[in-house]
Image: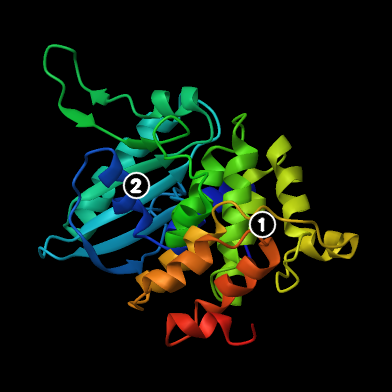
Amino acid sequence: MVNSSHEAMHRIFQEDPGIFTRTFRTLGIPFPETVEVSVLTTDLTETQPLERRLDTLLRVETADGRPYLLAVESQGRKDPAKPSSWTYYLAHLHAKYGIDPVLLVVCQDESTARWAARPIRIGPPEWPSLTVRPLALGPHNVPAVTDPSVAALDVPLAAFSAITHGKDPNAAAILEALATALKTVDEETAIIFSELTELGLGNTPAAQIWRNLMAIDLSFFRSESSQRLRAEGKAEGKAEGKAEAVVQVLEQRGITVADGVRARINGCADADTLARWLARALSVERAEELFVDA
């Protein structure tokens, strides 16, 4: 169980490490396709009594056979002591594991993210001996996922979008899209990402918006906020975007959607009916089975 906003910011990469390559693909940084990921110890302490720990450390196996280490740090503010620590982390990891490390810093505000992304140069300006280039993610470069159908196609990325944009004026639209998308995944996955989102938002105003959304027609969620607010009842949801989500979930599962079925789905304006079809889209063998009780 995650227990802080700081932990949620990097823990999401443990739940779905592929979020790293998918995010940076949108930024034009072509990391190789991930085929396997293993979680490594975050303890970088040496024999000297000086404890050093990363937030998350992953070994990423790639399709082209060139593995790398992904060191994830969650950074809530500018910290002058961090650059020297990050330099140490990367040098130590390279010496210990013998493979190339990548430092990823995740932030909730643009100012901190841009600070974290600055190259760190060790040595005199005439001849720097070592240069560290962190990859920083923040609201300025993480896509704002506001379309429920897009969120349903990549729930981890939608959750990460919600966390990094937690202080944005557009946070409500991102959270609404994520809440709709969580209804399309299995219960265990929904619980994990709903709780990660709640904790990642911390004490931001968006956190209360998320708690309210979790009280609406999400009885299978078990997060603390859901249990507190579930009794407040079921609110009327928006139909916009749900029809597209139904079709896209079917197509992602390899199920053919005939023109007649597509027209019926897109022509439905009842939010409850669309939500029911969206849930069924996860298990039906034929698209026509969405309407069996009609």
What's under tag 2, amino acid-wise?
Thr
Picture quadrant of residue 267: bottom right
Quarter of the picture holding the C terminus: bottom right
Q: Is residue 103 left or right of residue 14?
A: left
What's under tag 1, amino acid-wise?
Asn
Residue that badge 2 annotates: 23
Residue 139 x, y percent position in the rendering:
48, 33
Pointer 2 and pointer 1: residues touching (CB < 8 Å)?
no
Taking the view exactly as shown, the residue that stands out farthest to the right is 231
Of tags 2 and 1, the one toward the viewer is 2
Q: Which mark is residue 194?
A: none
Q: Earlier in the sequence, mark 2 or mark 1?
A: 1
Choose between 176 and 17: the one closer to the eye.
Answer: 176
Identify which residue is drawn at 26% across, 62% down: 60
Choose between 120 and 136: the one closer to the eye.
Answer: 136
Residue that badge 1 annotates: 3
Identify which residue is drawn at 16% across, 21% down: 128
Work out whether 128 lies above or below 238: above
Could you classify mark 2 by the number of other residues whose Cα lies within 10 Å: few (under 14), some (14-19), or many (20 or more)?
Answer: some
Residue 59 x, y percent position in the rendering:
28, 62
Residue 23 x, y percent position in the rendering:
34, 47
Identify which residue is drawn at 45% across, 46% down: 50
Choose between 8 and 219: the one closer to the eye.
Answer: 219
Quarter of the picture holding the N terminus: bottom right
